[in-house]
Image (cartoon, helix red, strand yellow):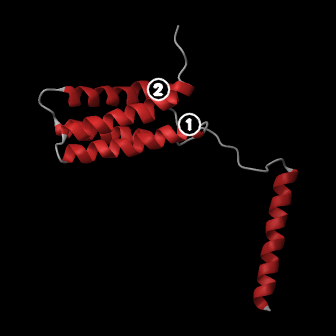
Amino acid sequence: MKRACVFGLAMVWLVGVVLVNVREGRTAPQRQKKRAASVHQLMEGFVSVNCGALKKALDAEKTNWKQVQLRAALLNEAGFILLEDGRCPDATWAKAARALQTHSVEVIEAAKKQDKDAALAAFKNLTSNGCATCHKVHRKKHD
């Protein structure tokens, strides 16, 4: 009986909170951007820089595996950052960001084994399934 009273009071409180919020026009929390970096800034200063450095490291005659792991790890983080703070506009973006996450880990795992062929294959998947997929839909055309 006591539990039923507590449950009933909790429901009355919840309904009251909802009614007050609806009356005041607060039906759902508004998503406001909390981070300073724009998508363009992230792409230019973070993703592009690390993607280019990773390609350069993988194309080098003598591979610097520490650099490969570093750049792939930073691209992995970018895959998460691009989904946060209201940056993800649709399923294409989300799929591409998850591909960035997945294939960057594959690059890291290949680098740990110093397997250049596997690292290059993972990087190719990263750029085609991550970058290119998203850019086909979201990158502004430059005249």
User: What is the three-letter code of the residue carrying label 2?
Assistant: Gln
Residue 41, label in figure: 2
In the picture, measured across the screen, residue 62 lies left or right of residue 72, that is: left
Residue 92, label in figure: 1
Residue 42: tell me if it is visible: no
Q: In what quadrant of the picture does the N terminus appear?
A: bottom right
Q: Quadrant of residue 19?
A: bottom right
Q: What percent of the width, then of the height, locates residue 73?
A: 32, 42
Q: Residues within 10 Å of mark 1 (few under 14, many from 20)?
A: some
User: What is the three-letter code of the residue carrying label 1?
Assistant: Thr
x 37%, y 36%: residue: 125
In the picture, measured across the screen, residue 84 lies left or right of residue 109, that is: right
Q: Give the Cα distance between marks 2 and 1.
A: 20 Å
* Residue sitting farthest toward the left: 62
* Residue sitting farthest toward the bottom: 1
Q: What percent of the width, then of the height, locates residue 89?
A: 61, 36
